[in-house]
Each structure stands twice: as C-alpha cells, then as structure tokens.
Image (cartoon, rainbow, N blue to C red):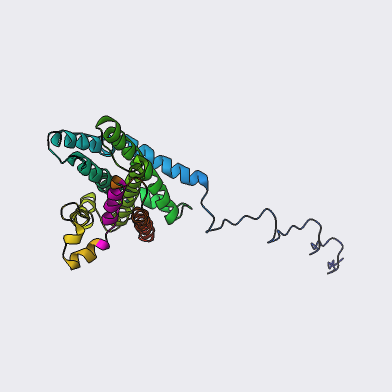
Amino acid sequence: MRFTPSLRSPLRSTPSLRSPLRFTPSLRSPLRFTPSLRSPLSPQAYLATTGRILRQLAGDHRSVAMILVVPSVVITLMYFMFENVPHLPGTPSPFNNACLIMLGVFPLIIMFLITSITMQRERVSGTLERILTTPLRRLDLLASYGTAFSIAAAAQASLACVVAFWLLGFETAGNPMLVFAIAIINAVLGVGLGLLCSAFARTEFQAVQFMPVVIVPQLLLCGIIVPRDLLPEWLQWISNAMPASYALEALRQVGANTDLTGTAARDIGIVVAFAVVAMCLAAATLPRRTP
C-alpha cells in the first residue's frame, strides 16, 4: 500500500516559459516615458513665472511708486528749477540738457535697485531654490525676470517720456521714440547688473551696497559732470569700459541730430551687448541652493 509520487505526475503544474499568459514589458514599449532633463522650456512655465513676478511687483506699492512716480516727480521738479535760468538763443535749454540725462540715468539706477533687492529677497525666502527644483532652467528663469522687469521699465519710460515731452515741453532734434528705446535699453541693463550683483549679496542691504561700486563710478565718468575728452587718459580708459558712457552718448546724439547717426547706433549696440553679457553672467552665478 505504499504510495510513491512520480516525478512525472500529471498533477504537477510547471508553468511554461512560453505560456501565453506571461507578460514581459518591452523596454521599447510605447507606454514607456522618460522625461528629458534638457527638454526645452514650455511657454506655459515661462509665462507663469513672468506673471508671478509681475504680480509680486504690483503688490509692492513702494516699488511701484519708485518705478513709476519718482522719475516723473523728479523731472517735474527739475523743470521748475530751470524755468527761469537764461540760455543763449538757438541753444537747448538747461532743462532739455538735464531731462535728457535723467531719462537715461533713472531707468538704470532704479531698475538696478529694484532688481537686486527683489532677487535677493527671492533667495532669502527660499522661493528661488524652490523654483530651481522645477524643470525651469537657469537661463530661462533669468529670461522671466528680465522680461518682467523690462515690462516695468517700459512702463516707467513711457510715463516719464509722456510727462517730459507732452506736459513739460521737452524737445529733441531726433525722434522721441529713440529716446524711449534707449531708456528701455538702459533699464534692461540695470536689470542685468542687478541680477548679477544679487548673486554676491547675502542680504538686501548688501545688495544695495553694490550701487556705490557699480553705478556711481559710471555716473561720475560717463560725461555728466566732466566731458570724457577732458578726463585724464587713464580715466578715459575706465570710462570706455562702462556702458553708461555709451548710453549717455547715444542720448546726446539723438538730442542733437534729426537722424540716427552711426555713433548713436554703435553706442546702442554696445549697451545692448553689455546687457546681454550681464544677463548671461547672472544666469551662470545662480546657485542651486540658497546660501
């Protein structure tokens, strides 16, 4: 009565390696999805980041006042300062000379301050670090900041030019749209320099401290106080390496000539190149972690 099960018992179930129920997913299955780390920036992410920055700026009433109100108020104050100052017939009025300079200087100074402080605030609050964990690339992030602040700069230049040209009687020999364009380019330059300097600051106060280092020397050597031709040779070399010198020269060319001169076109191109280089350097210095 002893029972010994056979090794080849028909009750033994051995799944076949070729069973039709077996499913082996293919590595080349059309359902497989591998996100690319170098995928291009989607317009939705770019527009969302730009919109967030613009909403943040609009919510800061002090920044809005500094961007829009302060330049127009200062230009109006200068108009009344120079109202009774005599000048030779056939020469530009003192207000014209001063207003032309202010339309180029204000966008550079104000956008440098606003950008450097805002960017440093993003770093300290951790917002920048959270954004950098998304697929948004560094250069794309800087493009969003540059676009948002450029829109703010365009609004600033528009309001300042409207007040100067149509309310205060400011006149130039060239096309007023060239003055408007140069003002926007100067503002974009201020944005690029502000983004770059914010990478080397740990607090908002340190970001402001870069202004005497980056902006003030340009204002002193660009020809506002002393003509560049009268500077010592070694200061002329330093002045030639500063973008504000070319921005002011371009504005003066527009103010004195009815057509766009070759010198003005060259100077505008140089300022644009400075702005692009500053934006690229700012993108390269963006850390993955907030210090």
The residue lying furthest to the front in this view is: 89
Left or right of 269: which side holds 226?
Answer: left
Nearest the viewer among 234 and 43 is 234
Residue 210, located in which quarter of the rendered image?
bottom left
In the picture, the quarter occupied by the C terminus is: bottom left
Q: Residue at x 31, y 51 (%)?
A: 250
Question: Looking at the picture, how far across and down is residue 90, in whole percent?
Answer: 21, 41
| Residue drawn at 32 percent across, 47 percent down | 257
In which quadrant of the rendered image does the N terminus lie? Answer: bottom right
Q: Considering depth in this image, is 258 or 235 the residue closer to the camera?
A: 258
Give above or below for 36 relative to 156: below
Compared across the picture, whether 158 is left or right of 201 comes to right
Magenta segment includes 239: no
Classify 44 as above or below 193: above
The reply, left or right, for residue 174 in relation to residue 220 is: right
Any part of residue 268 in sight: yes
**Residue 111 appears in view:** no
Front position in the image: 271 or 260: 260
Q: Main secondary structure of the magenta part?
A: helix
Instruction: Locate residue 3, reporting x and y percent.
Output: 85, 66
Q: Which range is magenta?
A: 240-254
Residue 246 shown in magenta: yes
